[in-house]
Image (cartoon, helix red, strand yellow):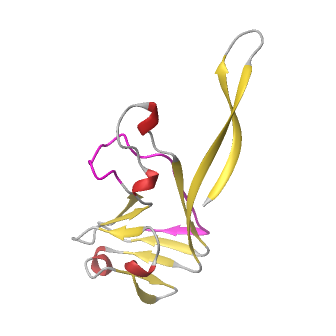
Amino acid sequence: MIRVKGTTESNITEETVYEEEVYSFNVIRIDGDLELSADLGVNGKVKINGVETDVSNITDLEVSEDGKIYSVGNQNDVATGILDTQMAKNGVVLKVEGNLTVNEETTLTSVVSSRKLWWTKRNVHILYRRFNK
């Protein structure tokens, strides 16, 4: 978990008041090339540096039952409703120290809330050397 301090404008007037806010990021780091595909996903796998690896070995990476959707993050990274107190508290970063390959019919996204609310995602950032599709 990375915490970043920032400022936000809480009141825009001639004398702008700034309020300090702390942003948290859930960082999932992969050392090497990462390949995601429906063929691998249906068996709960990914390839890291060409070697099949169980998704369960990677913290906060999930794959759907049909293997077509890979999600990063966890339930702490999503909102539970529309009130300020229910909004997502974390951003999610998937950092791939290599090339990222997402094969056809495969989607990489952030985790959604257990309530399946579409507005619940915070920020997802994916860092990689080269993207292959």
State the predominant SS element of the stretch in magenta: loop
Q: Tell me if 12 is positioned left or right of 34 in this view.
A: right
Q: Residue at x 52, y 50 (%)?
A: 90
Question: Looking at the rendering, which quadrant does residue 85 occupy?
Answer: top left
Residue furthest to the left in view is 66
> In the rendered image of this protein, does residue 10 appear above or below residue 117?
above
The percent position of residue 4, horizontal first and vertical second, equals: 68, 49
Residue furthest to the right in view is 15
Find out whether residue 51 is within the magenta segment.
no
Q: Tell me if 68 is positioned left or right of 5 in this view.
A: left
Residue furthest to the front in view is 85
Q: Residue at x 44, y 54 (%)?
A: 76
Q: Could you tell me how many numbered marks the image carries?
A: 0
- Which quadrant, please, contains the N terminus? bottom right
Q: Which residues are magenta?
A: 112-133
The percent position of residue 56, horizontal first and vertical second, equals: 38, 79
Residue furthest to the top in view is 14
> In the rendered image of this protein, does residue 83 appear above or below residue 95?
above
The percent position of residue 66, horizontal first and vertical second, equals: 21, 70
**Residue 114 vs residue 65, the one in the foreground:** 114
**Residue 112 vs residue 33, the one in the foreground:** 112
Find out whether residue 129 is within the magenta segment.
yes
> In the rendered image of this protein, does residue 41 appear above or below residue 49?
above
Q: Residue at x 62, y 46 (%)?
A: 23
- Which quadrant, please, contains the C terminus? bottom left
Question: Looking at the rendering, which quadrant does residue 60 occupy?
Answer: bottom left
> In the rendered image of this protein, does residue 73 appear above or below residue 31?
above
**Residue 130 vs residue 127, the one in the foreground:** 127
The percent position of residue 74, horizontal first and vertical second, equals: 42, 60
**Residue 26 vs residue 39, the one in the foreground:** 26
Q: Tell me if 130 is positioned left or right of 118 in this view.
A: right
